[in-house]
Structures are given as structure tokens and as C-alpha cells.
Image (cartoon, rainbow, N blue to C red):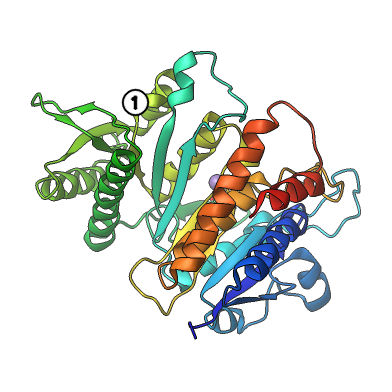
Amino acid sequence: MAQKIRIAVTPGDGIGPEVVAEAVHCLEALRSRHNLPMEWTRFPWPSHAWHEENGESMPADALDQLKQYDAILLGALGDPGPVDDPDRYLLPDSISLAPLLDMRKGFDQWVCERPARLLPGARQYLADERAKDIDMLVIRENSEGEYVGQGGRLRKGSPDEVATQMEVFTRRATDRIIRYGFEQARLRAAARAEEGKTRHFHTRDGKTCESQVCIVTKRNALRYWGDMYTEAFEELAKQYPDVATHHELVDAACMKFVQAPWAFDVVVASNLQGDILTDLAAVLSGGMGVAPSCNLNPDDPSMPSMFEPTHGSAPDIAGQGLADPTAMLFTTARMLEWLGRKNPAIAAAGRELYDAVAADLAENAGTTRGTQEIGKAVRDRLK
Ligand code: IPM
Ligand code: MN
């Protein structure tokens, strides 16, 4: 009997519970059809509602509880909405979103993977027809950088106030995220080859490779970590002669994401720069409604990874059944593939869910459907 996979389901705030409900229905369908050894527990925290009742977003031992699970499936955190209710219970972002950062840090989820592929049926924001070829994977360093939360405020409230916000970059975390990028580039090239497809990327010395890693920095202004990233990248690249290498400054990367996003394959960026680039990348792939994300700890199996779409709690539409669950369902598919490292049947269920969501998207281009309608349509496609 295969080991049972356990998932902690944390719907969170706003549209989180609405889209998570569809994800759980799909998990139920897949579990019963394929008799998968998997179970889940729903947690009412972290959330505004829990804070309102208990004075904290989650219990003090929340991470200890979550550590017992193989993965965390998170809806969204933030303003619960509805925005036209001025009396709703509302926390400052720094409080309501803290659990997200606590989980990433506490479980050392050092990779944030955000694929941006313009799938058939998704909204194409760029007029250029080559936008159909957008297929990149943005890998965001998720453990340090601009997000270490170190610093403080001195002489608070006075005209002489000083705020400091530290950025910390270690060689260890730099090496591991860049190496991860190269490995993903290789895997993507192999997956394309299996489908009989190839992409070509040119290197400066005239070689042509089937995959590419683009490293993003702001080394012309933030030179210390920028130079360290550059050196680490150049050194590691020697071990991946089959992968083309490229560098962009983050401002130029924003420009090129709009001008020629189809030229990117794998992009590795720092925590904050990756955060910003992935909102842009989400729009290139059809918008927040379709953009999946995950926070992974690839090297410690005792730590749960966390799966949450790129989107937030969408307080403007929360509670109305209007949220598109597509991003959440793609994210759930990715979770199953990840968990499938321990069980091939679960990985297959992840691919089945991915295919069902993609097929639903392709067949319903331009239609307006509610959360439950989309969820049911996807479920009906599962074998
Ligand atoms: C994201 C979000 C978070 C981040 C916020 C909510 C702290 O924007 O997951 O991209 O900046 O990481
Ligand atoms: Mn973000």
C-alpha cells in the first residue's frame, strides 16, 4: 500500500475559499476515480476571519502543524472584501500577508516557480501574433534578497525619521537558485524534444542551444549582489554548455517581456525583481486568472512545499462567484505533479488535471463563466 499523501488546504481570504473549493472538488474526483492514496485537511487559518476571532492570523504553532503535511494548497491572503463594505474587518497588508512569508521562510521554500505560457483560449494582451509562442518559466529566488525583513525605523514619526530595509544575498542561495534554473532549462528542452518540438537560442560565441537561462539583476546600480550573481552564473554555466546564457538588467527585462517575450525560456530573478516580473509575465500568459505559482523546497522532503496562484484575494469580486479558478486549478495540477515524485499515479493525476484545465480554456475562449461553472466543466473532463 503506497504511503498516504497528506495535503493541508488553507483557503485564506477573499476569493481564496471560492477557488479552493473548485480545486478540492477536482481532488475528490481524481482521488475516487483513480483510488489515489491522498487525503487533506482544511484549515480556517491563516485568514482575516481567524484574526478577527483570535487576534492573530494563525495559531502560534501553525508551522509545526503544517509541517506534518506533504504540501500546502493555499487560496489567497489579503483584503477579504467586499470593497464596498467600509466596515469589513481589514488588517494592514504587512500583517495579513505575513503568514505567506513565514511559510516560505519557515519551510525554506527557496524556489518560486511561475510559468508563463500563452495557452490557446487565454486572453492575448499583446497584438503581435508571435505572442502565441510565449512560453517561459520565471524562477524567483524565494528565501532571501530583498525579502529578509531586516531593518527598522528610527525616530519613528519625527521629521528626522530613518527607515532602513536590508537586502541580503548569500553565495549559497545564489548558487542553488541558478543551478535550479539550469536544471529546469535542460528539463524543458528534453520535454520539448519528447513532443517533437525544438526552440533555438543563440549564444554570444555563435553557438545555438535548445534552451536558455536568462539571469536578471540590476548590476549597473546594485553592484554587490549583481556582481556576485554574475560570477556565480558564469561559473555554473560551464557545467551546462548545452544551455544558452543571457543577462538582462531588470528594467530592460520589463521592456523585453513586452517587446519580445517569446525570446525567453528560463528566467532567474531575485525575490523582489522576480515578484515584479511575474505580475507582468502573468499578464503575458493571459492574466492573473490563469497564472499558477508554487513555492518549493526541492531538497528537504520533510518540509512541505506551498502551492498558491500568483493572484491575490481580489476583494473587488470576492463572494460573488466570479473568480476564475483556472489559476488555482493549474496550481493544483502542479502540486499533484510535485507530490507525484513519491507516487507516479498522483503525478499522472496532475497531468490529467492540467490537460483538463487547458482543454477547458481552449474551448471557452472569450466566454464569461462563474467560478463553479468553470470548476464543473473541468471536473466533467476528468476521465
Ligand atoms: C506574491 C505576492 C507576495 C510577494 C506578497 C503578498 C507579499 O505579491 O506572492 O507574489 O510579494 O511575494
Ligand atoms: Mn507578487
Looking at the image, residue 72 sits to the left or right of residue 59; the answer is left
> Residue 267: percent from the left, percent from the top?
34, 40
> Residue 208: percent from the left, percent from the top?
16, 28
**What's under tag 1, amino acid-wise?**
Ala
Q: Is residue 33 above or below residue 250?
A: below
Crowdedness near tag 1: few (<14), some (14–19) or many (≥20) residues, C-alpha within 10 Å: some
Which corner quadrant of the image does residue 29 belong to?
A: bottom right
Looking at the image, residue 326 sits to the left or right of residue 107; the answer is right
Judge whether residue 153 can be spotted in this image: no
Numbered disc 1: secondary structure = helix
> Residue 183: percent from the left, percent from the top?
26, 52
Q: Is residue 44 above or below residue 309?
A: below
Looking at the image, residue 79 sits to the left or right of residue 279; the answer is right
Q: Nearer the viewer, residue 139 or 275?
A: 139
Q: Residue at x 45, y 54 (%)?
A: 164
The residue carrying mark 1 is 263
* Total tally of numbered discs in the picture: 1
Screen quadrant of the C terminus: bottom right
> Residue 306: percent from the left, percent from the top?
53, 64
